[in-house]
Image: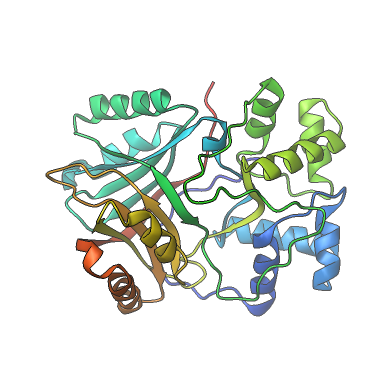
């Protein structure tokens, strides 16, 4: 049931047609926790269940969708996401890419235009486990690792420039922590770990996906649906649905904007930056002086670099005198993109 495909370099292919765009928008918002969820969604789109399933398979195969299934927020279970960077000599870039990507804890890896030219995310079940992975990468590559754990999340989600998705009544809205509120912790038991392991690569694209997962785990599909509903309520699952490839949606220019913001004002300003259109991710991370003075990160997506730069100017205007300096690191290749993988 794996939906993993080789990473691809950013390109500017034709965007999905209107029917695919409508389908992506609907499934971006959430798959219902019903016995035959694809049939329920298909009915609302005016198509049949098998047509929807076949189109989903095609969108995954051609890279329009990165994956389809639950998006886990492992921090709600005490886990840790760490953004890290390497300055890789060009002659070694391909070899180092293989070394970094070989670690299952590396969920994403991008090449960016900067002296620090490789940026990857380690997703692990604890801060200690993440640190151990980073130490192994440093030892294997012989390169110093710049580690930037997430300190505060302001926004996570690519806003699609299409019709707003409709959340099915059977899918509870995930619980969101308010600013300043620590994430509620959820203890994972053996059944939870088995469920995450079975779905972290994506849901089976079959008529009864929750029954299929239950069959793998030896439990009824109703049990799978009930636990996923709890995980949504707890925030351990952000949503269950489509993860679009923003390049294939026409967003061929993607810049990680970084800002040196007054510590006393960053939280209030970070929320406002995260609310801007075109910002898909916005976090507070630690500075690493003297080489890395930036503490606010905002991923900005546009159809051209000029559009990204316009959005960066809007962020700069919003931050005003609270920001001392900034930079834009453009993505030039996707080296890996798999999402969370629990490791035994």
In this view, the residue farthest toward the front is 264
Q: Residue at x 37, y 62 (%)?
A: 269
> Can you give x and y, in whole percent of width and height, for residue 288 in the image?
20, 42
Between 184 and 217, the one nearer to me in the picture? 184
> Can you give x and y, in whole percent of width and height, for residue 162 in the image?
60, 76
Number of numbered discs on residues: 0
Quick check: 188 above or below 224? Answer: above
Q: Is residue 90 left or right of residue 311?
A: left
Q: Quadrant of residue 74?
A: top right
In this view, the residue farthest toward the left is 290
Q: Residue at x 35, y 78 (%)?
A: 307
Q: Quadrant of residue 188?
A: top right
Q: Is residue 321 left or right of residue 267?
A: left
Quick check: 261 above or below 310? Answer: above
In which quadrant is the N terminus drawn? top right
Q: Is residue 65 left or right of residue 277?
A: right
Colour pattern of the rendering: rainbow
Quick check: 67 above or below 124? Answer: below
Q: Quadrant of residue 233?
A: top right
Q: Is residue 277 left or right of residue 3?
A: left
Between 216 and 283, the one nearer to me in the picture? 283
In which quadrant is the C terminus drawn? top right
> Can you give x and y, in whole percent of width and height, for residue 43 in the image?
86, 67
> Can you give x and y, in whole percent of width and height, for residue 211 in the image?
84, 39
Q: Residue at x 33, y 71 (%)?
A: 318
């Amino acid at each position: 049931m794996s939906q993993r495909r080789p990473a691809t370099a950013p390109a500017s292919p034709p965007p999905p047609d209107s029917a695919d765009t409508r389908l992506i928008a609907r499934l971006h918002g959430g798959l219902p926790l019903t016995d035959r969820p694809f049939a329920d969604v298909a009915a609302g789109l005016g198509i049949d269940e098998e047509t929807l399933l076949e189109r989903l398979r095609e969108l995954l195969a051609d890279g329009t969708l990165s994956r389809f299934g639950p998006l886990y927020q492992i921090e709600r279970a005490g886990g840790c996401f760490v953004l890290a960077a390497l300055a890789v000599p060009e002659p070694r870039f391909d070899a180092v890419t293989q070394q970094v990507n070989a670690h299952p804890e590396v969920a994403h890896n991008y090449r960016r235009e900067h002296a620090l030219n490789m940026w990857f995310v380690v997703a692990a079940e604890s801060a200690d486990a993440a640190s151990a992975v980073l130490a192994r990468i440093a030892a294997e590559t012989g390169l110093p690792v710049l580690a930037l754990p997430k300190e505060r999340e302001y926004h996570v989600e690519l806003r699609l420039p299409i019709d707003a998705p409709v959340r099915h009544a059977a899918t509870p809205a995930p619980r969101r922590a308010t600013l300043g509120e620590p994430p509620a912790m959820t203890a994972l038991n053996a059944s939870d770990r088995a469920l995450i392991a079975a779905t972290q690569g994506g849901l089976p694209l079959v008529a009864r996906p929750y029954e299929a997962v239950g069959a793998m785990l030896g439990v009824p599909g109703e049990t799978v649906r009930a636990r996923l509903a709890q995980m949504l309520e707890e925030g351990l699952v952000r949503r269950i649905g489509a993860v679009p490839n923003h390049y294939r949606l026409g967003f061929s220019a993607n810049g990680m904007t970084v800002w040196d913001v007054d510590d006393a004002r960053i939280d209030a300003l970070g929320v406002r930056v995260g609310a801007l259109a075109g910002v898909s991710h916005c976090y507070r991370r630690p500075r690493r002086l003297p080489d890395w003075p930036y503490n606010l990160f905002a991923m900005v997506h546009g159809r051209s670099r000029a559009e990204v730069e316009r959005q960066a100017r809007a962020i700069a205007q919003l931050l005003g005198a609270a920001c001392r300096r900034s930079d834009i690191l453009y993505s030039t290749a996707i080296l890996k993109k798999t999402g969370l993988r629990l490791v035994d």
